[in-house]
Every structure is written in structure tokens, then in C-alpha cells.
Image (spheres, rainbow, N blue to C red):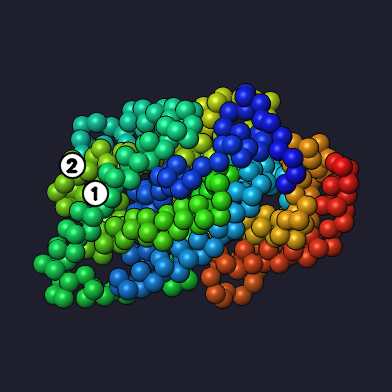
């Protein structure tokens, strides 16, 4: 990477530069913040979508395992690059897409994260309204939109504390929900939950796509934003494995059980049917809060790469305000379609960045602060590779898993482009810096 360049104190959370070695952290300092992303009721709802389309529990579990294995591979690739460079996903995109091209990518990422944030805001209001029908959704949506932005403004330390509390609370809630669900299934269906069989409305490929979509924007953008603070490969691997092989599938299982047993994918109604929504109230709120603050935090980093002259805090407030208002409009109603869209749009983005790093920058990665003014404004070949990846989902014959197909297409095309332009990018840039 070259000589480490000091980051100005005004660069809050290192949003516009490299995280220095002195600020790198271990598993204990990072894992709860990451768990806060995958320990969320929105992923529970994705589990409900999977169970609604699957014929039985076994098919649902298979889709989850395959989907989250895909996510783990993507997460490791993006996170290791971020760990080695110390850069957020938005800043990494500058090397691949050019300074202005990266701004488009960062803006797109921000808009998708805003969608997640708005869904979380709506869930806050919906759960409250479910428990206390006299309280309308809108004031709760506004209140918690403000609180989630506040914690994101405070940065990683406060976010990690909320993540710890949310992890403990939702683990208790989840275990109770699964236990009660299995118990109720035994009394409703002869042979229990494994005996439930119905006509599948979605193919296995579509089920896997929903599983991938439940967290794909996080592994492409938020994972590297967090793992730029990781001190080594072991830390990165441990954090990603805990989140994507234990915590994420656990949350999906809650939604799967709820849909199969009660016919509900909304966790608020599942818990209400089980008779202990009031006991889970605080845990669910902490859980949603933990996830939404991560969306807001990551978005502020992306926006900082687009508008470096505007303070991150101001950009975060703008993001939170718009996201909260969108939550009032009820984007949650289109949750299933939203997941399918994310599973198509985000993997090609990661494919381009991963391929460009491996084939162009891995051996000659310059420090961003030194190279920033020398990077091209646009890298049209990378934009073409990304567009081709997305388009392949609609052009190529249906086969395999769409999330993998679009990533592979963008990766291969970018690898070819990167190999062809190697001299004009990495080596020439290094010579200019030296």
C-alpha cells in the first residue's frame, strides 16, 4: 500500500481516507456491529418470504444455506480488499470506476441503503401499532428515524454498544419464537413442522435469490465499510463467518417457522399470535435500531465520497430525513420485489471491484490520498462491465442462480478489461506518484 498518510482529525470515522494501522481492531470490537446488521427483523421477514414460496421446511433451509454461502464468498472478497487497503467501499470504487463513476456507484448504494432504512423505520411504527393499536404508525416512524440517525452520528463505539444489547435481546426473542413455533406445530400438524408440505409457488433458484437479497447490499457495501477497521485476515474471516453462517440463518429460521406454522411473515404478527409480543418489544426495537443505524452509517460514508466538502454528519442527517419520510410511504409493502432487485443489482458491483483489484491493483495499490488527484474521472470499461452483469440477468437464458451469474459475468468482463489496460492504470499511476 505504500507509506501511510496521516488522516486529519476532522475526517470523522475516516470517511474520506485510509483507516490507519493504529485504529485497526480485533473480533470483539467489530463482531457485534456486524451482527447488528444480520440480526434484524427484516431478515426474519425474508425468511417468511422463503417459507411462503417453498413446499416444506427442508427446501427453505436448503435455500438459506446455499444463499448464505454465496453471501459469505462475496463478503470475504470485498472485506479482505477493504481490510488490506483501509478504504470504504465508496472509496475503493474510485479505483475501479473512476472518481465520477464511483460517485454514481456510491449514490446507487446510498439509495438502496435508504430503502432498507425506510423499511426499518416502518417496522418500528408497525410493531408499535400492532401492540398498541391506539398509537398510529407515523409518530413512531419519525421518532425512531431520528434516534437511529443520532446513534449513527456518534460512530462505531455507540453503534457497537447498541449492537451488543440488540444481539442478546434478539437471541432470547428468537429462541423463544422458534421453540414456541415448533411446539405449536406439533399440536396443529400431525408429525410436527417437518410434516408440513404444500405446493411450492417459487422455484429453488427464486428462493435462493431471496436469501441472497436479504443481505447482499450489506456484504457488498457495509461489510467492507466495517472491515476496513479489521486488523488481520483471521479477524475478518471470523466476523463474517459468525454473521453469515450463524446469525443470519438464525434470523431467517424465525421467519420460516412463523410462516409455516402461523401463515405470517411479519414478526410483529408472529409474536402476537404466540402471545408474547409485549415481552419482545424492547428486544425487537433494539434489533431494528442496530440494523438501521448501520445502514445510515454506511450511507454517510458513501455520500462523503460523493460530496467530500460537506461534513459527514450533515449528509447523514439528510439521508435519515429522506429515509424516514420514505418509510412513512410504506416501501415495506414491496419487500419481496425489493429483495429480488438487490440480488440482481449489487453482486455485479462487487464483481467489478473484486476483479479490478485482483488483476490491476493487488501488487501496486497506491495510497488513495496520494493517487486521488491522478485517478481518471470515468472508467467507462468498468461501468460497461457492471451494466453487462446486470443485463445478463435479463438477456441470458435462465439457468443456475441469478446472483452468481451476474457476479461472474461482471467479474469476467472486468478481469478482461483490467488485463488489457493494466499498464495504463496501475503501473503508470505508480510511476506518476513515485
Q: Position of residue 434 (x, y in %)?
A: 87, 42
- Taking depth in this image into account, of 173 and 116 the one nearest to the observer is 173
Place of residue 49 in the rendered image (x, y in percent of width and height, measured from the top left): 37, 60
Residue 358 is situated, as x and y percent measured from the top left of the image, at 71, 60
Residue at 66%, 38% in the rendered image: 18
In the image, 55: left or right of 366? left
Give residue 99's position: percent from left, percent from top.
75, 41
Task: Say the numbered circle drawn on residue 279.
Answer: 2
- Please rate how many residues cluster around mark 2, counting C-alpha atoms within 10 Å: few if below 14, some from 14 to 19, many from 20: few
Q: Which residue is identified by label 1?
A: 173
Residue 174 in view: yes
- For residue 3, which quarter of the picture? top right
Would you place residue 329 above or below residue 95 in this image? above
How packed mark 1 is, by other alpha carbons closer than 10 Å (few <14, some 14-19, many 20 or more), is: many
The CA span between labels 2 and 1 is 8 Å
Q: Quadrant of residue 55?
A: bottom left
Q: Horizontally, is 170 left or right of 234 in the view?
A: left
Q: Is residue 120 visible?
A: no
Q: Nearer the viewer, residue 188 or 239?
A: 239
Residue 353, picture quadrant:
bottom right
Q: Are marks 2 and 1 in contact (CB under 8 Å)?
A: yes
- Residue 118, above or below 421: above
Residue situated in front as seen by the camera: 3 or 359: 3
Instruction: For mark 1, give the secondary structure.
Output: helix
Sooner in the amino-acid sequence: mark 2 or mark 1: 1
Q: Does residue 151 lie above or below 70 as drawn?
A: above
| Location of residue 131 with respect to 350 vertically, above or below | above
Q: Nearer the viewer, residue 34 or 213?
A: 34
Q: Which mark is residue 309?
A: none
Residue drawn at 26 percent across, 65 percent down: 260
Amino acid at each position: 500500500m505504500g507509506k501511510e498518510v496521516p488522516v486529519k482529525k476532522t475526517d470523522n470515522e475516516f470517511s474520506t481516507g485510509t483507516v490507519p494501522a493504529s485504529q485497526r481492531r480485533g473480533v470483539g470490537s467489530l463482531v457485534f456491529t456486524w451482527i447488528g446488521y444480520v440480526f434484524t427483523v427484516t431478515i426474519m421477514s425474508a425468511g417468511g418470504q422463503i417459507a411462503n414460496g417453498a413446499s416444506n421446511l427442508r427446501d427453505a433451509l436448503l435455500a438459506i444455506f446455499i444463499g448464505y454461502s454465496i453471501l459469505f464468498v462475496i463478503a470475504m472478497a470485498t472485506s479482505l480488499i477493504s481490510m488490506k487497503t483501509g478504504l470504504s467501499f465508496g472509496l475503493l470504487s474510485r479505483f475501479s470506476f473512476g472518481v465520477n463513476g464511483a460517485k454514481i456507484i456510491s449514490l446507487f448504494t446510498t439509495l438502496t441503503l435508504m430503502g432498507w432504512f425506510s423499511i426499518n423505520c416502518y417496522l418500528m411504527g408497525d410493531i408499535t401499532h400492532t401492540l398498541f393499536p391506539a398509537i398510529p404508525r407515523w409518530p413512531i416512524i419519525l421518532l425512531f428515524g431520528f434516534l437511529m440517525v443520532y446513534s449513527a452520528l456518534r460512530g462505531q463505539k455507540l453503534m457497537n454498544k447498541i449492537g451488543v444489547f440488540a444481539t442478546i435481546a434478539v437471541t432470547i426473542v428468537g429462541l423463544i419464537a422458534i421453540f414456541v413455533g415448533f411446539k405449536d406445530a406439533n399440536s396443529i400438524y400431525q408429525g410436527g413442522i417437518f410434516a408440513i408440505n404444500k405446493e411450492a409457488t417459487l422455484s429453488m433458484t427464486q428462493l435462493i435469490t431471496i436469501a441472497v437479497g436479504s443481505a447482499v447490499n450489506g456484504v457488498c457495501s457495509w461489510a467492507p465499510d466495517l472491515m476496513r477497521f479489521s486488523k488481520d485476515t483471521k479477524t475478518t474471516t471470523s466476523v463474517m463467518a459468525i454473521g453469515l453462517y450463524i446469525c443470519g440463518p438464525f434470523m431467517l429460521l424465525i421467519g420460516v417457522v412463523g410462516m409455516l406454522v402461523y401463515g405470517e411473515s411479519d414478526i410483529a404478527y408472529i409474536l402476537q399470535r404466540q402471545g408474547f409480543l409485549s415481552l419482545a418489544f424492547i428486544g425487537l426495537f433494539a434489533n431494528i435500531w442496530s440494523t438501521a443505524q448501520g445502514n445510515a452509517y454506511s450511507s454517510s460514508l458513501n455520500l462523503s465520497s460523493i460530496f467530500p466538502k460537506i461534513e459527514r454528519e450533515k449528509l447523514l442527517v439528510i439521508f435519515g430525513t429522506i429515509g424516514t419520510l420514505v418509510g412513512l410511504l410504506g416501501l415495506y409493502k414491496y419487500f419481496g420485489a425489493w429483495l429480488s432487485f438487490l440480488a440482481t443489482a449489487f453482486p455485479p458491483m462487487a464483481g467489478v471491484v473484486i476483479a479490478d483489484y485482483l488483476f490491476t491493483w493487488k501488487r501496486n495499490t497506491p495510497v488513495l490520498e496520494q493517487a486521488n488527484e491522478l485517478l481518471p474521472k470515468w472508467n467507462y470499461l468498468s461501468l460497461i462491465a457492471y451494466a453487462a452483469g446486470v443485463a445478463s440477468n435479463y438477456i441470458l437464458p435462465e439457468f443456475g442462480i441469478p446472483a452468481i451469474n451476474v457476479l461472474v459475468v461482471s467479474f469476467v468482463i472486468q478481469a478482461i478489461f483490467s488485463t488489457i489496460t493494466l499498464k495504463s492504470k496501475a503501473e503508470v499511476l505508480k510511476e506518476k506518484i513515485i
